[in-house]
Amino acid sequence: MALTDRSSRHSRLRWLVVAIPYLWLIVLFLAPFLIVVKISLSTTAIAMPPYTPALDLTAGIGALWEQIKEFSFDNYVFLTEDALYWESYLSSVKIAAISTFLILLIGYPIAYGMARAKKEWRTTLLMLVILPFWTSFLIRVYAWIGILKPEGLLNQLLLSLGVISEPLNILPSTLAVYIGIVYSYLPFMILPLYATLEKLDETLLEAAADLGCPPIQAFWKITFPLSLPGVVAGCFLVFIPAVGEFVIPDLLGGSDTLMIGKTLWAEFFSNRDWPVSSAVAVVLLAILVVPIMLFQNAQKKASE
């Protein structure tokens, strides 16, 4: 009897442990997402809230069904008809993809150097990578304004060295957006790469050297393939949030820098068109579902 009670208690605890993260996702992700979907199927109105119909759960099933029948996909059709939106999506994906590639080029050597450093130095190097997270993201982006503006630190340094004869117009521009994204998201690339490279068995490289394999060839045949889980994880950790980035393009980008985060903000706060902005958010999430699923599959394969 005691064994039965203990088994039943363990079973309840196991179900509780499993249920808590699912409940967390339902409350903080699924429920808000359904609200956004509902607003995206509504119509703009001069009211509060600024859309109709506003569901009234106390009105009864009949009234609720009548309100649901008023939903339409006109906002999604509108997104396909206005070039601003699909150009914003394409531009966001392009900027995020190029930024991810640049961050990988910069982050991989840094992570490799950290993994090959002496063990007593690795903790210090890791802390230096994490250190920027101790400062507000907004403040760090604002700091780049002081660096990149015409009278900023970068132009003053280049002028004093005689590299340029007049200040460079870097800010605002798409180039400044790339600089801001690369700087801000670089730790998200370094950390998973370091975690993978640090576990690499160095005896494999020693065996390759004993067999006459050049270091560069050993890197491409041994080190890089074994580090692919970290590469995939880092790329998706950078690409997914970079697509919807708003702060960096808003502060560092010019009027020609088109990203879906800025478009979404303008629709929601400037135009107060909640249904269209909600439709933009739903489509953005649908675009990001593909890399998220790829990331999950990569993580699953890496753990097998």
Image (cartoon, grey):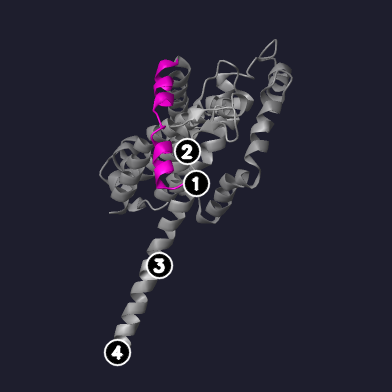
Q: Is residue 240 left or right of residue 135?
A: left
Amino acid bearing label 3: Leu
Tags 3 and 4 in contact by the CB under 8 Å rule? no
| Image point (47%, 47%), residue name | 57
Is 60 covered by the magenta stretch?
yes
Tags 1 and 2 in contact by the CB under 8 Å rule? no
Q: Is residue 42 visible?
A: yes
**Residue that mark 2 sits on:** 36
Tags 3 and 2 in contact by the CB under 8 Å rule? no
Q: Is residue 60 above or below residue 167?
A: below
Mark 4 to mark 2: distance in Å? Answer: 51 Å
Tags 3 and 1 in contact by the CB under 8 Å rule? no
Image spot of residue 77 (x, y percent): 39, 22
**Residue that mark 4 sits on:** 1
Amino acid bearing label 4: Met
The furthest residue to the left: 211
Q: Which mark is residue 16?
A: 3
Amino acid bearing label 2: Val
| Image point (47%, 21%), residue name | 88
